[in-house]
Image (tube, grey):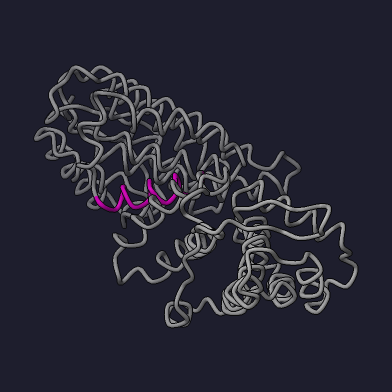
Amino acid sequence: YYITNNLRLKIMNFGGPNLLKQLLSTAKSALENDDGKEFADLMSLNHPFSSRQWNLSHISLDPPFDQIVFEHFQCSNALIANDYVVAFNHQCNVIQIFSRMFKTQKEDNWGLPLMTTLIKDMYSLAVKADIVAVANGEMAGSKIDACADMLMTVFRVCASDSRTSIEFTKRWGLMPIINLLFKCYFKTNKLHLCKPLIIAIETNAANKDIKDLFSIADRVTYNYFVGMKHMFENEFKGADKCLSFAFENCLKSCTSNKRKILICLIPVKMTLGFMPKVSILKKYNLCEFEDVVEAVKKGDIKLLNESISKNAAFFIRAGIYLILEKLKVIALRNLFKKIYLITGSFQIDVARFQTALNWLGLEDVDSDETECILANMINDGYIKGYISEQHKKIVVSKVNAFPKLNTFL
């Protein structure tokens, strides 16, 4: 596809014909040279041309670029008018036209930069359009779902190109698409739809070869969302691996992104028994975790409850409130370990644990409930031992009575 020399555009525009002539001349050169980056820049909603309003009556270009350019400027016109729903619909039209064209291009992937630009703009518009749609009485997430459907259209085009050589395969577009799909599914709480996408990258033989060759930015984003999914599914070792990769490889200058990753990584690390340093919390302005960390270390269940309640709004907004609730059992484990170390015996009265719990503010906890807590912790692997009901004692193992958390979680 290319724009011929008899390019004609009958228009009325507020920017003047010279600007439009410049745009089309640049587009013609980019397309004739298969310069996807240059053409992608022109079709970006962040390009200066997109900030002008154009009245287009007829475009005579070689298809399908006549339609792509027309729909693009219809989208930018709607965006200038703050009509995000109409802008989103036009951007979806651009994606549809592009997908059909891209599918016909065999043994070629010059359009990948254009694809990446178009889908990122579509997602941004979908978020804004969804807010407007909800205000107009539509179901929340309707535009996000529509965006995900369009992304899947492009995903299938790229995923099916499995026989083309690595240099020219469209599979290089998979991770940018998957990252946007992750964003859609996390926004609409459809995390189960992430699994096929992860399989496409992790287990597909053709894609495993290029998994580690995607840009570091794409891999950081991918690992962040996969880590989040593992976290929500209580797969803490997998979450630790992915979120740690994302944090370590995120640019130091991207402080806000590193902070966002840490908000999830900290509770995951704590669940596995690794406590963050206060200096890290201060560096990334995460003072909400300071008392939480201190409480878990000390086994102070009262302080832990108070610190979680105090910052509940922050933790709920971050999606980690329920994960922090799981830290209570770790705080109890640390408390019971202290009692074990103080007594210096492998046989400890249940009453000692009850006294400690009552002293920390859990005044309603009686002997039976204390036994139940201990039994559950033994069953879950936090303590090695058994309860002697007859003697009201807990008998702990003489070897590694309190296993490291990362050995069984």
- Locate the N terminus and report the quarter of the image it occupies: top left
Q: Is 173 in front, or is 98?
A: 173
Q: Residue at x 38, y 46 (%)?
A: 222
Query: Residue 242, image x and y in percent?
Result: 39, 50
Query: Residue 343, image x and y in percent?
Result: 65, 75
Q: Quadrant of residue 12?
A: top left
Residue 263, compared with residue 82, is above or below; it is below
Given the current orientation, which residue lies at the most extreme left position?
33
Q: Residue at x 39, y 45 (%)?
A: 120
Query: Residue 188, image x and y in percent?
Result: 61, 41
Q: Is 377 in front, or is 158?
A: 377
Q: Residue at x 28, y 29 (%)?
A: 65
Q: Residue at x 67, y 57 (%)?
A: 395
Residue 95, compared with residue 73, is above or below; it is above
Q: Which residues are magenta?
A: 216-229
Specify whether 281 is left or right of 373: left
The question of residue 176 being in magenta is answered with no
The majority secondary structure of the magenta stretch comes to helix
Q: Is 374 in front, or is 319?
A: 374
